[in-house]
Amino acid sequence: MRCFLDHNATTPLRPEAKAAMIAAMDVVGNPSSVHAEGRAAKAIIERARGQIAAALGAEGADIIFTSGATEAAALALRDQGISCSGVEHDAVTSWCSVDLTCDQDGIVSAPSTERSAVQYANSETGVIQSLPEGVFLSDMTQAFGKLPIAFNWSGAKMAIVSAHKLGGPKGIGALVVKRGTEITAQIRGGGQEMGRRSGTENLIGIAGFGAAAEAAARDLANHAWAPVEKLRNILEKTIEQSVNKTIFVGKDSPRLPNTSMMVVEGWKGETQVMQMDLSGFAVSAGSACSSGKVKASRVLQAMGYNDTQASCALRVSLGFDTTHQDVMRFAETWIAHYEKFQSRSAGR
């Protein structure tokens, strides 16, 4: 039986999102049309915008729909001369000067906040940042849906989010902007999304995003992540008791409740991913946005880990459907593979 433990890469579609998307498929109108059918489509978009704003604590801010967090980052950061650290996602570092530093716990130092991008939570390690007041942009993609967030109180000027990280569909995200902030459109044409992102809106994806955000906010209010965090801690304790050489990255820092990044020096992350995949477990060696490549974690390198350690990382990210049996079965299988690795290493 397969066990999916890569929820930071993507999450299963929530039933609420699926239902909203199916309903939107029957809406024929173009949201830019002024007739009744167009207004019905537009109403779906505005409802989703409100759902996302409420879930993110961003009432009064502008929610600009994009094809995902990557496009949202480009829309915010292109030609802005912003600084960031090496722990940011590639979608952010691609547009920034990577000259901010962080410590071995992954905590970023940003001396000039108004010209800096600082993520809310790291996708690989799960480490949570305390956002400095006035930061230019925050990547809230991993934190949205897992942590209580109030964009309006975060001190950030802008934020990027993505639907498929919280149970929505893939291919839809948003840039959240404090009202009055100037944004230069990168995609020009019909002037959709308040003139900031032209093109006929992805009505079905937007409907799913809104429903997923509303459901995620309800889960947070019901403390649904607490049992997941408990399972994550059981996983780490079980592994630590058998393999005391394991490094759990960021363990002494606040982390996302579902995320564990472990390092066993000398045991390549790509090897672990393949071994666990063949054993029925979907895990990763880091971010999923590198065209399927498995390579040394740039995040760990930025945190001060050496190249060998950065090449030996495995990320396990749990979800609401993860059970105690899943966690124990994973731990037992991983430990068995580790023992084989140890035996091979000793025989060299």
Image (tube, rainbow, N blue to C red):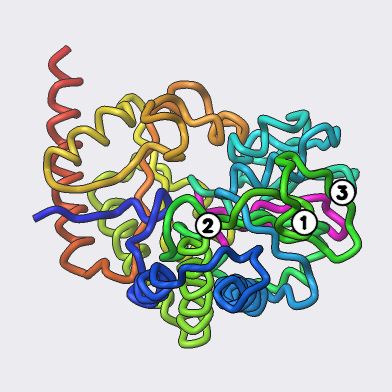
Snapshot quadrant of residue 96: top right
Q: Residue 342 at x, y = what percent? A: 19, 29
Snapshot quadrant of residue 179: bottom right
Give the amino acid at mark 3. Thr
Circle nearer the viewer, 3 or 1: 1
**Residue lying furthest left in this view?**
1
**Label 3 crowd bin: few (<14), some (14–19), many (20+), radius 10 Å:** many
User: What predominant SS class does the magenta segment belong to?
Assistant: loop
Q: Earlier in the sequence, mark 1 or mark 2?
A: 1
Quarter the N terminus occupies? bottom left
Q: Secondary structure at mark 3?
A: helix
How many circles with numbers are drawn on the protein? 3
For residue 202, which numbered disc appears in the image? 2
Q: Does the magenta segment cover residue 342?
A: no
The residue under the point 55% across, 74% down is 37
Q: Is residue 229 visible?
A: no
Give the amino acid at mark 2. Asn
200 vs 4, nearest the viewer:
200
For residue 113, which numbered disc appears in the image? 3
